[in-house]
Image (tube, rainbow, N blue to C red):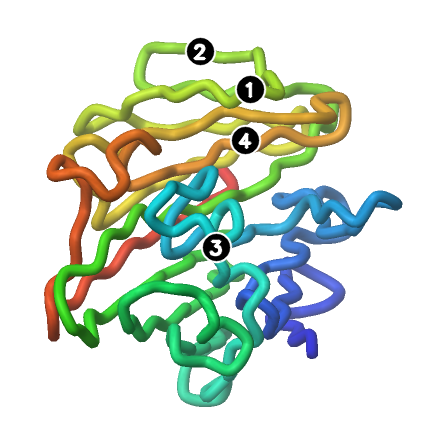
């Protein structure tokens, strides 16, 4: 089921209960996010998928988990739309019927989207909780697609990137770096909260004349399930946020 948030004749977004994914965001003049679609070969593109419990290819210890994790394909439960002004709140966990077959420790998680019409911004908050037993290896990420409306550019601090290859490029983020996405019609500021000291973005596209991706990840993919990576202990809680604002 899809939910529309905001003024359909103005700045608004459409969110699906599958993966709590933003399918569309923008207004009649310009898309902030390239709209979600499914190609003839079955591959899904566009929107803002959430990559959880990890980003990238499956590792040997969890070879049964699909690339970019299961959350983006899981049916989450929408539990509130009236308590939050212009927002939707979804919950799920790894014991859910559609994902319980994956070999992974028990985690619960929630996704909150807030639309800020006055500032033309969308916030995405991902929270997760360790249910045990043991430590849970994680490497969460957001995977927004931006439209190429005449430009395909990202500025990170004093660095500028215009190449979005099929083999994703990892770019580290340092404290204080602004992340600016330029689509040709819009200039978008990306702000991140809750990411670790090794936070990075992956730059990627398989159709750069249509869309490009600036994907913030907690850690580079090679650190997942290593002692340098992120682990969630029993009863521990963590939250990541991505705020996209039209400038």
Residue 46, given in percent of the width and then of the height, sits at: 67, 45
Residue 230 left/right relative to 118: left
The one nearer the camera, 125 or 182, is 125
> Which of the 4 quarters of the picture holds residue 162?
top right
Question: CB of mark 2 within 8 Å of CB of mark 4?
Answer: no
Q: Is mark 4 on a helix, strand or loop?
A: strand
Mark 1 vs mark 4, foreground winner is: 1
Q: How far apart are marks 1 and 4 (CA)?
A: 25 Å
Give the mark nearer the N terminus: 4 vs 3. 3
Mark 2 vs mark 1, foreground winner is: 1
Count of numbered marks: 4
Please tell me whether residue 142 is drawn above or below residue 206 in the rendered image.
Answer: below
Q: Is mark 3 on a helix, strand or loop?
A: loop
| Residue 64's disc number | 3
Give the labeled residue for mark 2: 160
Q: Which residue is at 65% across, 51% downward?
A: 26
Please tell me whether residue 108 is drawn above or below residue 146 in the rendered image.
Answer: below
Give the mark nearer the N terminus: 2 vs 1. 2
Q: Quadrant of the N terminus?
A: bottom right
Residue 138 left/right relative to 146: left
Q: Residues within 10 Å of mark 2 (few under 14, many from 20)?
A: few
Q: Residues within 10 Å of mark 3 (few under 14, many from 20)?
A: some
Q: Is mark 2 on a helix, strand or loop?
A: strand
Q: Distance between the residues labelled 1 and 3?
A: 23 Å
Q: How crowded is mark 1: few (under 14 residues within 10 Å), some or many (20 or more)?
A: few
| Residue 39's disc number | none
| Residue 167's disc number | 1
Give the mark nearer the N terminus: 2 vs 4. 2
């Amino acid at each position: 089921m899809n939910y529309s948030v905001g003024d359909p004749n103005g700045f608004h977004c459409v969110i699906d209960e599958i993966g709590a994914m933003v399918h569309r965001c923008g207004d009649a003049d310009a898309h902030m996010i390239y709209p979600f679609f499914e190609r003839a070969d079955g591959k899904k593109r566009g929107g803002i998928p959430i990559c959880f419990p990890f980003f990238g290819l499956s590792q040997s210890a969890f070879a049964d988990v699909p690339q970019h994790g299961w959350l983006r394909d899981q049916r989450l439960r929408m539990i509130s739309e009236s308590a939050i002004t212009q927002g939707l709140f979804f919950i799920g966990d790894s014991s859910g019927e559609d994902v319980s077959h994956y070999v992974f420790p028990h985690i619960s998680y929630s996704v909150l989207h807030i639309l800020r019409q006055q500032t033309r911004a969308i916030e995405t908050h991902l929270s997760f909780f360790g249910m045990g037993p043991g430590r849970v290896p994680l490497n969460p990420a957001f995977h927004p697609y931006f439209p190429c409306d005449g430009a395909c550019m990202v500025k990170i601090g004093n660095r500028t990137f215009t190449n979005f290859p099929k083999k994703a490029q990892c770019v580290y983020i340092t404290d204080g770096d602004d992340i600016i996405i330029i689509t040709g019609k819009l200039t978008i500021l990306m702000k991140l909260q809750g990411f670790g000291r090794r936070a990075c973005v992956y730059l990627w596209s398989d159709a750069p004349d249509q869309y490009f991706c600036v994907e913030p990840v907690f850690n580079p993919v090679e650190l997942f399930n290593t002692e340098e990576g992120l682990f969630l202990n029993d009863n521990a809680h963590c939250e990541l946020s991505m705020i996209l604002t039209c400038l």
